[in-house]
Amino acid sequence: MILDGKATRSIARTEDGKGVRILDQRQLPWEIRWVELRSMDEAAVAIREMWTRGAPMVGATAAYGLAMALAVDPSDEALLAARDTLLHTRPTAVNLRWALDAVGTAVGDLPPEERAEAAFARADAICDEDVELCRAIGASGLELIRALHAQNPGRPVQILTHCNAGWLATVDYGTATAPIYLAHDAGIPVHVWVDETRPRNQGALLTAFELRNHGVPHTVVADNAGGLLMMQGKVDAVIVGTDRVTANGDVCNKIGTYLKALAAHDNGVPFYVALPYTTFDADLPSGDAIPIEERAAEELTEATGPDAEGHVTTIRLTQSPAANPAFDVTPARLVTGYITEKGVLDRIGG
Ligand code: MRU
């Protein structure tokens, strides 16, 4: 990722190696604030309260959280308790369980005194692998974008994305955004329609921030605008990330993704889902069984941001009760293809 013109990862160990530093995404794009997490409890709070977020980043942060817990108490009981706490921070993204299992397996047979170091090493490896997976996803998706450009060489390729599946949501590159960054860097003109992604506005605040930093042309649109843009022929492809893909190919992602898939289907616009293998849940047969996170109503009934003087302030948007399901499931039949580290896989099923 390019931040202030410099290549940076969105999570890295602190200088003394005992904690991690992450960007506090609640402050973006208004303030770039790095925070250090120095205990399992701090990692759990950062995930639960969405200082950091996005399926692969949640997994990476939890992996370090487990390592930090083992540095304090490497016993079997402490390992199980820390795993349980971290696993329950957020329910929907399967990367969280995957990462905790990966660290648990790496340390399970070791004597207690060796566990913390091995856990940190496994968490480092998860991060390194995530970068490579996202880079490979980018290379797979680049060919799709190249083909779209060949169909309409006279204008930029128009891509619509939802939420933030960018480098803030991973260790680097992102999943949905990796093909976009690689295409832009390869000189293919790309323009991105960025869904604002209510209620937390990950699109307007985070994806737009990323694209701006990378110099990729983009426009933020209201979540409800995508259907019209597709009908007007202004979208060549939709590319989104995902929190979990089940064995039958159903795709769980940020609330509103399903409506984009329906609109894309109705308008003959290809709908692609970018994911690494760590987001595939072979244990669940279909999307109905995915736990959908219900978040606080205040995310919907209030909005926070700087006023004209730059003072961060919170305002009310409604006086009525609100419900806030944070994810939805797009049936496999609406997915054109899955952009993975192994290439683009066709729709699963009919
Ligand atoms: O609630 P969030 O912001 O964690 O939701 C994130 C998403 O829905 C992303 O699209 C998904 O995690 C993929 S991130 C590569």
Image (cartoon, helix red, strand yellow):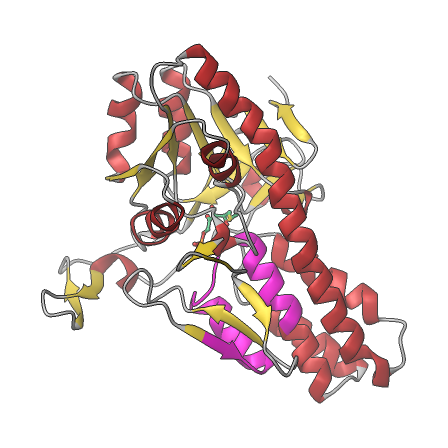
Q: How many discs mark residues in the rendered view?
A: 0
Q: Is residue 21 magenta?
A: no
Residue that appears at 29% across and 21% down? 234
- Residue at 34% x, 52% y is 209
Q: 165 or 327: nearer the eye?
A: 165
Nearest the eye: 36 or 319: 36
- Residue 333 makes an appearance in the image: no
Tell me if residue 62 is in the magenta stretch: yes
Q: Quadrant of residue 235?
A: top left
From the viewer's perspective, tell me whether residue 178 is left or right of residue 279: left
List x then y, in percent, for residue 285: 67, 37
Residue 156 in view in this figure: yes
Q: Residue furthest bottom?
A: 72
Who is closer to the viewer here, 65 or 24?
24
Residue 213, position in %: x, y?
A: 37, 51
Residue 166 sits above or below residue 236 on the image: below
Q: Is the residue 92 above or below the residue 113 in the image?
A: above
Magenta residue span = 35-64
* Vertical placement of residue 38 versus 125, above or below: below
